[in-house]
Image (cartoon, rainbow, N blue to C red):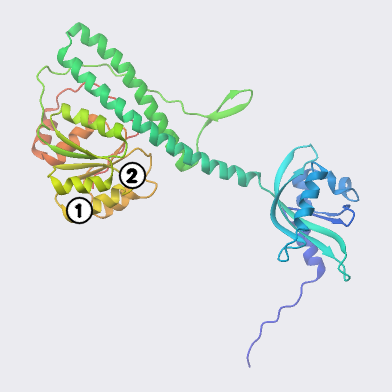
Amino acid sequence: MEARLVFMPLPVQYFQKLVESCPDIIIAVDREGIITFYNDGARQNLGFMPEEVLGKNVLEVYPSIEEARRVMAAMRADDDAKKGRVGNFETVFKTKKGEKIPVAISASIIYDEQGQETGSIGFAKDIREIRRRDQLVTLGEIAIGLSHEVNNSLEVLVNQVEMLQRYIGRVATDEDYIVESERLESVASQIRKIQDITGRIGGMAEEGEYGTKEYLHGKMMADLHVDAGKKCPERAKAEARYPLSGLRVLVVDDDAGICDSLTDMLEEERCSIETAASGVQAVECLGRQQFDLVLTDVVMPDMDGHQLYQIIKETFPSLPVVLMTAFNYDKDHIIKRSCLEGLQGVIFKKPINPVLLKTLLLQKCRPEAASAMTSSSPTQPASPAPSNEKLYQH
């Protein structure tokens, strides 16, 4: 015998209990606009007790008659598919305290057997929390974009301070060196502070958690306080060494300031530098000449760092590639995907720490020199290394 499922209609009181206990606002009115039903969700959201609104005009919960008419006009619009009802129509309700709250209402006109209107019923949801979440998503995107752009500018500042420190170490007298180094360290400490702040902004946008503090009459702001710290400068040895001399490096970044800054820094180390403003230009450069290493941005308009890495891996399998990014997290998993496909070495967060970048170039291109430098460990002048920089060895 074949089994059949039989659905029995629920008694009316089941639906009544469901509507009464619904956390959303449910209000019914007659054809004159008099409130005939007001559930507990409406009481919780609007603050009116049932006895305060039942039997009264629906304008008790609307901020104006114009707003009430706007909702009814939408329900009566000449649309055969939606005539007599609206779905998720945004309007405004008024609480007992006079506060206006945005709601999304789904409502239907009730008709009698003759097709005459007898009233209407609507389900309304307070959408303040939904809007707040949307705003937080937007603010998170703004924060990440801001962090990216600021870090690109910091890249130039970090490298210029590094070169000034090296220059002063070569030409200044001992007395002048102390004074000028303190000035540069003051600049470097503020750069580190800005780097820490952009790092915290990116982290807060990613994690959605952050501390707050009061700033004006009970208003709150995100707590971005960081301790920049201070380092005492030490003079480098007078004899300069150039272990990177002669390395051929291709720098790929759509930001011209980054390309120029890295070029200045690496040319100081007597590297031979070529730059490309896009992944497509980088591929063209690789077809024309040989390089010892490719240093490329992750986020670029025509070809991202992962796509460029794939091309290099297939065409020049022995050519080292280093990805760099100004974002504080790998939003599109470009770095992760590249690592899973064989990317070897260190991935920097921009602004790049000049000392670590030089160490990386030695490790990837001249490992013997890198080992010698590690064992000798010469004293280096203080440099503005970002406190949130992460190194990944694969």
* Camera-nearest residue between 262 and 360: 262
Q: Secondary structure at mark 2?
A: loop
Residue occupying the far front of the picture: 78
List x then y, in percent, for residue 328.
38, 39
**Does the residue at mark 2 contact the one at mark 1 (Cβ under 8 Å)?**
no
* Res. 26 in view: no
| Rendering quarter of residue 144 | top left
* Res. 338 in view: yes
| Rendering quarter of residue 221 | top right
**Left or right, 344 with reference to 140:** left
User: Mark 1 Cα within 10 Å, few/some/many (few <14, many 20+)?
Assistant: some
Whether 12 is drawn above or below 161: the answer is below
Q: Name which residue type carries label 1.
A: Lys
Q: Secondary structure at mark 1?
A: helix
- Quarter holding the N terminus? bottom right
Whether 302 is drawn above or below 192: the answer is below
List x then y, in percent, for residue 315.
17, 54
Name which residue lies at 54% across and 41% down: 136
List x then y, in percent, for residue 314.
19, 56
Residue occupying the far bottom of the picture: 1
Q: Which residue is mark 2?
A: 300
Name which residue lies at 19% across and 18% down: 167
- Tell me the distance, in whole angstroms, between the alpha carbons under discs 2 and 1: 18 Å
**Left or right, 196 with reference to 290:** right
Q: Name which residue type carries label 2.
A: Met
Whether 37 is drawn above or below 269: the answer is below
List x then y, in percent, for residue 310.
24, 54
Q: Which residue is mark 1?
A: 313
Whichever of callouts 2 and 1 sits on the residue coming sooner in the sequence is 2
**Left or right, 135 with reference to 116:** left
| Rendering quarter of residue 14 | bottom right
User: Mark 2 Cα within 10 Å, few/some/many (few <14, many 20+)?
Assistant: some
